[in-house]
Amino acid sequence: MEYSPCGALYVWLTAQDTVRMGLGEAPVWTDGSARGALRQILHSAREKTDFRATGGLTLEVLGTGNGYLLIFTAAPADAGKPPRTEGPAAYWLPDSDSLLQLAGGLPGLTGLPYASLYRAERGFFLLIYGRAPVLQQLLCETAVAAGTGDTVAAHIEEYGRACCIGDALTRLQKCYSF
């Protein structure tokens, strides 16, 4: 169990842990027994770390070779679907250095649009929903335009590994300004 400065709680569970918790080897994370186990995990996290969740939580479950990585984050106050005024714009960042360069330019910016970050076979894709005039110069310096529209977004969502959905820029901004 680890609490990150970005506000996320990381919990590693082995297959033996899930069996011991009564979830079996391939748990269904949305059923009642899993919810009870998740409550136990959160209670334990409050005792062992600084993780304090008020309001909603987002849970991401990633399968690992011998278990699961659970990532708990506090849901943003305006959680929900992003406003869809136009199709999303996709940007490709070739490596983590480009991603950090983008994050370095975010502190101090306001009015950030909804954005999702995906890991690809080579690099990262950032999907930005709506207009992003405050980001145009920064994106020109750190990323390559990869297309626009729902078809491009659907392809990235299907073949990429989701890192952050909906509030990627806000999370990058918080992590970098820590």
Image: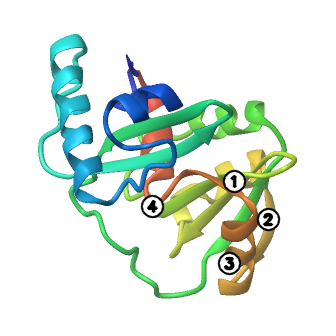
Residue topped by disc 3: 154
Question: Which quadrant of the figure has residue 149?
Answer: bottom right
Q: Is residue 14 visible?
A: no
Q: CA distance from mark 2 to mark 4?
A: 19 Å
Give the x, y percent position of residue 67.
56, 33
At 64% from the left and 40% from the top, the residue drawn is 102
User: What is the three-letter code of the residue carrying label 2?
Assistant: Ala
Residue topped by disc 1: 139
User: What is the three-letter code of the residue carrying label 1?
Assistant: Leu
Residues marked 3 and 1 touching at CB (< 8 Å): no
User: What is the three-letter code of the residue carrying label 4?
Assistant: Gly
Residues marked 2 and 3 touching at CB (< 8 Å): no
Q: Nearer the viewer, mark 4 or mark 3?
A: 3
Q: Quick one: 139 or 63, which is closer to the camera?
A: 63
Question: Which quadrant of the figure has residue 167?
Answer: bottom left
Residues marked 1 and 2 touching at CB (< 8 Å): yes
Q: Is residue 112 above or below residue 46?
A: below
Question: Does label 1 or label 2 sit earlier along the sequence?
Answer: 1
Question: Does label 2 or label 3 sit earlier along the sequence?
Answer: 2
